[in-house]
Amino acid sequence: MAGDPEDSARALLDVAMAVMRRLRSRMRENRDDLSVAQFRTLITLRKHPGASLAEIAEALGLAPATASSAIDGLVTRGLVARATAADDRRRVAVRLTADGESLLAEHRAATQHELAEALSALDPTEQAVVRSALDLLVPLLSPGEADCLNPAAPGEARAARNGADP
């Protein structure tokens, strides 16, 4: 039934699972063996450069040990680097390396292209409806995190949609 939040939630879960299956499948097919957790970590670090392990774990909804394991793998591959935070020597800051930025950009572009191909089956009006729904859902479900979904610098995408400067 239209307008039923439970029905909408059920449909949203179905779509989210389908997108995650496609993303995992793409990650498995990719030769660089980047896991979904590592991909999400790179996205988080792009949005929050210099984040601590605890901040990364919280942003990803992971236990600190799980986030640490993902970061260890990324450090070993040279995709992220750890350094003592400039403002607090007790804190370790994690940042993307140039290789991490490049790999993230590659993965995002390929994934976006694959999803765009799937969406091309919709007519322009249906595509506009999907985009409008997503514009409503992202800030509702992830307050403050909407910009991490856009490869533009944080704030630019929202400002562009609202017709303002970032």
Image (cartoon, helix red, strand yellow):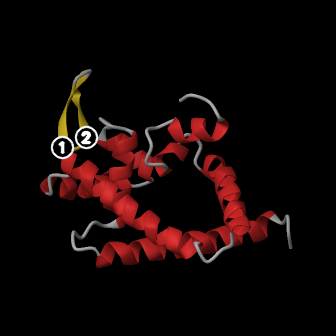
Vertically, is 124 above or below 142? below
Q: Position of residue 76 (x, y in %)?
A: 13, 56
Vertically, is 87 above or below 54? above
| SS of the residue under disc 2 | strand
Q: Residues within 10 Å of mark 1 (few under 14, many from 20)?
A: some
- Determine whether label 1 and label 2 are within 8 Å by CB: yes
Which of the two residues, 100 or 93, is positioned nearer the viewer here? 100
Residue 80 visible somewhere in the drawing = no
- Name which residue lies at 45% across and 53% down: 61
- Name which residue lies at 65% across and 51% down: 135
Q: Position of residue 80 (x, y in %)?
A: 21, 47
- Name which residue lies at 25% across and 40% down: 94
Picture quarter containing residue 3?
A: bottom right
Q: Position of residue 132 (x, y in %)?
A: 70, 55
Q: Residues within 10 Å of mark 2 (few under 14, many from 20)?
A: many
Return the disc, 1 or 2, that comes first in the chain's sequence. 1
Q: Residue furthest front?
A: 124
Left or right: 9 as drawn, with respect to 150:
right
Q: Position of residue 36 (x, y in %)?
A: 36, 65
Picture quarter containing residue 9?
A: bottom right
Kindly identify which numbered label has been placed on residue 24: none
Kindly identify which numbered label has been placed on residue 81: 1
- What quarter of the picture does the N terminus occupy? bottom right
Q: Amino acid at mark 2?
A: Val
Residue 156 visible somewhere in the drawing = yes
Which of the two residues, 110 or 90, is positioned nearer the viewer here? 110
Picture quarter containing residue 35?
A: bottom left
Left or right: 34 as drawn, with respect to 114:
left
- Name which residue lies at 22% across and 23% down: 86
Kindly identify which numbered label has been placed on residue 94: 2
